[in-house]
Image (tube, coloured by chain):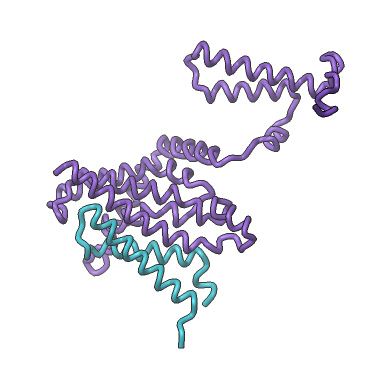
Chain colours: A cyan, B purple
Amino acid sequence: MALPANIMLLIFMLGVGLISGILMSVALGKKVTDSGGILGGLFVAFLMWVLTGGPSYI
Amino acid sequence: MSSEVAKKPIPFNELSTHLKRGYLSLAVFLVVLSVTLITKPPIPIQTILIALALVVMLIGNAKLQDLMAGVILHPIMAMIAGFLAAGAMDLAGGFDALLHALNILAGIKIGGFAVLGFMGVAVILANIPTIMPMPCGRILAVALLPGVVKYGNRMIEIIESTGPTWGGIPVEVILPSLMGAFIVNAAASCGPSPLGGVGGIGEGNLGVKIGSSGLAQQAGIMIATGLTAIIISFIVSATYM
């Protein structure tokens, strides 16, 4: 069974947040695997998904 | 030539009161601006313009609500409002409070493990304008930029005290990278704004639901924020090597 569209959107956004977090970590002199940068990126992506009404479609 | 243009102009003394006042206010406006340009008085142009607006209001016998109705709204005013907010926040110690709060956020630990750390907070800080998209990106850009600079300097202090950076990136790179990322994020943030930013204008013209392209734009801006940080980091690092 296919996932609901908004869940797929959340997964996509989390992927975007992950990439953005890693890019910023490397840019600011931290390792690619720096957990702070990754978690920060994931948090931002999740927040954007929530604030644009993502959960309301569940 | 059309008949309207060819028509003989009405003599000045026969003009309506409204037009007479209009001429007077226009003359005052042009004279004051010309005198300001020539004499260059030691007063900010903003003060002169506000005084001029008051004089024109008196000439035109306009009330405050007439003035508010006649104000031409433009995003540049949002930037000015942002500057005013930033100045007021700086005076009130708002940026010191912001730095303090960010330090607390960076220090939150679960089971002895720092959840976000300084890097995670930097990522959140750089993305704040797109998390809260305003109709003009300059509102948050100018209002928070002093806070970003303070936070970047704090990051440099911490990284200098904890050891070398990964990949030998000089610490001088941190502030321009963080600022560049924040500025790009803020500059683009009026796109996904549901309050009437440039994206909203496009959606209105297309007749689609306002905010329907918001999340897609936010995804693009997030990637652009990270890319900007890394491009600035590489370029600035190259100048130090």
Q: Measured from the top left, where is residue B70 in percent x and y?
A: 69, 35
Q: Which of the image's four quarters has the N terminus of chain B?
A: top right
Could you tell whether B47 is left or right of B172 in the image?
right
Quadrant hosting residue B31: top right
Query: Is B167 rendered above or below residue A52?
Result: above
In the image, B220 versus B165, the foreground residue is B220
Q: Which of the image's four quarters has the C terminus of chain B?
A: top left
Query: Is B131 rendered above or below residue A58?
Result: above
Q: Measured from the top left, where is residue B138 in percent x and y?
A: 47, 43
Quadrant hosting residue B157: top left
| Residue at (82, 15) in percent of width and height | B12
Q: Measured from the top left, where is residue B189 in percent x and y?
A: 46, 52
| Residue at (66, 17) in percent of width and height | B28
- Toward the top, the furthest residue is B39
In the image, B2 versus A1, the foreground residue is B2
| Residue at (46, 66) in percent of width and height | A49
In the image, B86 versus A2, the foreground residue is A2
Query: Is B214 rendered above or below residue B236?
Result: below
Quadrant hosting residue B207: bottom right
Could you tell whether B133 is left or right of B109 in the image?
right
